[in-house]
Amino acid sequence: MEYFDNYFLHYLNKREDFDRFYLQQGVLDYLKEEKARGRIRNLGFSYHGDVPFFEYLMDNFSWDCTLIQLNYQDWNEETETPEGTRIMGSLYRKAAEKGVPCFVMEPVRGGRLASLPESAEKLLKEREPNRSIASWAIRFAASQPEVVTVLSGMSDLNQVVDNINTLSDFKPLSKTDQMVLQKANGNAVALQAVACTYCRYCMPCPYGVDIPGNFKVYNDWAASLGFLDEDRKPSEKQKAEFLRHYRNSIEKSARADHCIRCRKCLELCPQHIDIPAEMRKIDTIVQDCLNASGRGKI
Ligand code: SF4
Ligand code: SF4
């Protein structure tokens, strides 16, 4: 090929870096020249910073496209990043205000929105029995008028086929669909104990802890209980079920008690989960369940 259809400045997240590399060192001018020569058709950037920097980029420069994270669960939520606070809906709305077409990354939130707690899935299945749970996330992103492309990481053929089916003969979410999705999401968020997407960016833990595995067992248990708070304690039977599930799912050497709180995983987690604190919580639950069962160790 003699040209790029879409050329993205990679991973913009800090204004000082952008000003230094792209403005002071002349890279943006060079790319504009390449665009004028026809070697770049659309010039844009992929974004990982806070809302004010995004607004600065949109208000002060001319872009043909942008690549932003967008999913229904974080649409109105404030997400704390090392660079500041981000609200996904705000990034999209700013791009739309400027008429800049959006490419979407992470529409299924690292796979987290491919399955939801039972009560949330039930709502979506009642509305669309033949559609997958992940398809709702893809449709939410693709339903936004300024979204031109939805990028989704896929790990097997079924996911490829499902995504193709979702976007072939595409039907945007109706008002009723959106209400159903909002309700299902409310249930899912309420039942989530740890906001882990199971992306595995934190792995491997140098001390062998299976971080996403521990969170999965914990989240499944919390979702099956329908609650997990100080006032309503799980029954003996529910504790025994947790122990059984934990023992069967997590190798001895990969359990939460092996976390020595070295904190090496913290900066790797895009969800900014306090992993060692959560590991301590899981270990306390395990110990509590063990005490209830009268067993000394798992
Ligand atoms: S803080 Fe715990 S889970 Fe994280 S890397 Fe260290 S030992 Fe592993
Ligand atoms: S703890 Fe964070 S980095 Fe690790 S799997 Fe979960 S979301 Fe990903």
Image (cartoon, rainbow, N blue to C red):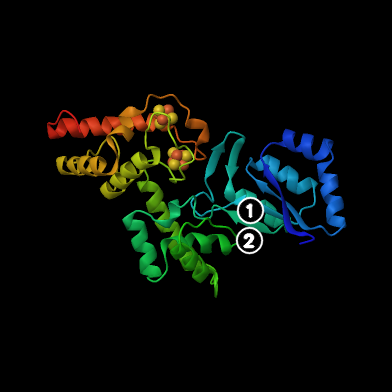
- Residue 270, image x, y percentages: 52, 40
Residue on which the image places disc 1: 92
Q: Residues within 10 Å of mark 1 (few under 14, many from 20)?
A: many
Task: Find residue 192 and report its image quarter.
Answer: top left
Could you tell whether 236 is left or right of 13 in the image?
Answer: left
- Is there CB contact under 8 Å for labels 2 and 1? yes
Q: Nearer the viewer, residue 75 or 247?
A: 247
Instruction: Give the quarter of the figure containing the C terminus.
Output: top left
Q: Residues within 10 Å of mark 2 (few under 14, many from 20)?
A: many
Please tell me in which quarter of the rendered image ligand 1 is found.
Answer: top left
Amino acid at dot 2:
Val
Residue 178 picture location, percent across and down: 48, 63
Of the two numbered discs 2 and 1 in the rendering, the one whose residue sits closer to the viewer: 2
Residue at the spot 39% in from the left edge and 69% down from the top edge = 127
Residue 75 is at least partly visible in this image: yes
Q: Which residue type does callout 1 highlight?
A: Tyr
Residue 191: image x %, image y %? Answer: 35, 47
Q: CA distance from mark 2 to mark 1?
A: 9 Å
Q: Is residue 64 above or below residue 14?
A: below
How many numbered badges does the structure rendering display?
2
The residue wearing badge 2 is 147
Outermost residue, left direction? Answer: 294
Residue in the foreground of this view, choosing between 27 and 91? 27
Q: Of marks 2 and 1, which one's residue comes earlier in the chain?
A: 1
Instruction: Using the image as rendered, state which of residue 204 and residue 289 is in the foreground.
Output: 204
Q: Quadrant of residue 281?
A: top left
Q: Is residue 288 left or right of residue 282?
A: left
Quadrant where the N terminus is found in the figure = bottom right
Badge 1 element? helix
**Secondary structure category for the residue under label 2:** strand
Q: Picture coordinates of residue 161 (x, y %)?
A: 48, 68
